[in-house]
Amino acid sequence: MAGGADLMLPGVVLPSTGLPGVEQGRLCAVTLVGNRAPVAIGVATVSTREMLASGMKGKGFNILHTYKDQLWASGDKSGPPVIAPLETEASPEEDDEQHSPDLMLDTHESETQMKNLCLTDVAADKNRESEDIAVEEGIETTKDSENISPQEAMDVLLNQCFFQALKYKVKKSDLPLLTSSFLRNYLFSCCPEGEQVDIKKSSYKKLSKFLQVMQQRKILQVKELTKGVESIVEVDWKHPDIRSFAAPVSEPTASSENIDVGTEDFYQPPEIISLYGISAKMMPLFQESGQKKGNLLSQNDVRSMIISYVKKNELVHPENKNFVTVNPVICDCLLDKSEQHDITLLKWDDLVTRCLERMQHSHQVTFPGSSPVIRKGNIEPIDINVAQRASNKKVTMIKNLELYGLDPQSFASLLQQKVQASATCTPLPGAKDRVQVQIQGNQLPHIGRLLLDHFKIPRKYVNGLDLSTKSSKKK
């Protein structure tokens, strides 16, 4: 309910005295076992007689206001008092305590509380009205010792994100809207931090079945364009379920050492600088600049020292300043044996390029807020490859994400959300403590946008994106 769901009758605990007499459309307060302080206010969708006749199945109440919703957040956010149950309610509480001896009060909201809910008729409880008003702005909640199943939890999350997307994201001008676009661009963006909707883990299994249920409830209308392609053509924003939905208030979370790749604000690409070490063979070129063997230089430093060496030794060609005269030091350091008798002049760019190629390559990686890390060799790019499996099925593989501060598991989850395809992480062959992400289908365009546009990884550090352009040209 805290996520915007209505109260279903299977979640209501029947007191020993029976349910109070409630008529359809009556305003009611929802409380928890062991505490008479209301946690929600709702309107009965059916009468007490109809609830019992249905075997306590189906929706019982449209929830209007809950603890920790936006209305609560607009107040002083004070903690609620504990209001002891009446003597007539003692027996159900005792029965509950026998089965759940560890049941205790907590200020944190939980989806598992839905199985501990009991009902109090506001109209029949006027003598406690002042107490109810006093605790409306902050109410203590109870954690149930029983956890709801993962499927039920996914259903709750799916419903919450669905109604939040319809009420706050989708506009009339967006219609007609492809169901796949609605899922990817609207519903997924409403997921609470640290959670994600996986329809396959819900009781609906498919988006089409879920939308069919919503269509039967006359919340929206879906039209099939072609086989397997559906579009939302109409939404009833005046529907009670949409109007009564209240988006949960997201609370700030404690800072974590782990980078959440799903949120762009938390990830910043590292600064990568190529470094060049001075070898014994290249030492004569840099000795005049006061450098020693093994010193690491940036590309600009190397260029500056080469220019200084050339000018100091007056090696610029007098007739064409674009060329440098090859002296014995340059000959030994930069020319192959087969070239030493043939080449007497080198262009400036060729001179610097040859120098960089013959130096010892390293790279420095600096993450925001961290000390620089220097590693030997050039940094490996993020490598993307598309492989073909049995039955002509394709799979896209991504490796080397760790080198750029991206967690492969989080990246796989984010990618799975965007393309709605199965993604896994497997050990990278020949590399210790490294994994690669595998996702079904050819997902090169999506991966490219995610790496280049979302995470701002420079294009030169992403290898394999040109495969998508080659495949499109073949078509």
Image: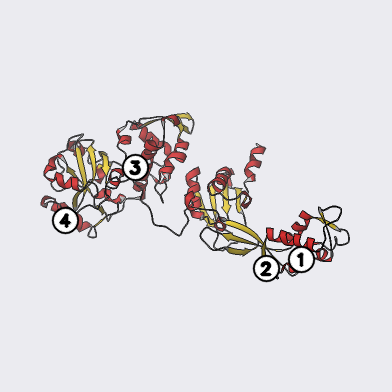
Report helix, strand or loop for mark 1. helix
Q: Residues within 10 Å of mark 2 (few under 14, many from 20)?
A: few
Q: Secondary structure at mark 2?
A: loop
Quickly name the residue at label 2: 295
Is residue 262 visible in the rendered structure shown here?
Answer: no
Which label's residue is closer to the chain start, 3 or 1?
3
Are the residues tagged 4 and 3 within 8 Å (C-beta)?
A: no
Labelled disc at residue 285: 1
Q: Quadrant of the C terminus?
A: top right
**Disc 4 vs disc 2: Cβ atoms closer than 8 Å?**
no
On the image, numbered disc 4 is attached to which residue?
94
Where residue 3 sits, quadrant-wise, is: top left
Ranked by sequence position, the earlier of labels 3 and 2 is: 3
Alpha carbons under labels 1 and 2: distance apart: 13 Å
Q: Quadrant of the N terminus?
A: top left
Tell which tag, 3 or 1, sits nearer the viewer.
Answer: 1
Estimate the spatial distance between the alpha carbons at disc 3 and disc 1, rounded to whole Å: 67 Å
Determine the CA span between mark 4 and mark 1.
88 Å
The residue beneath circle 3 is 247
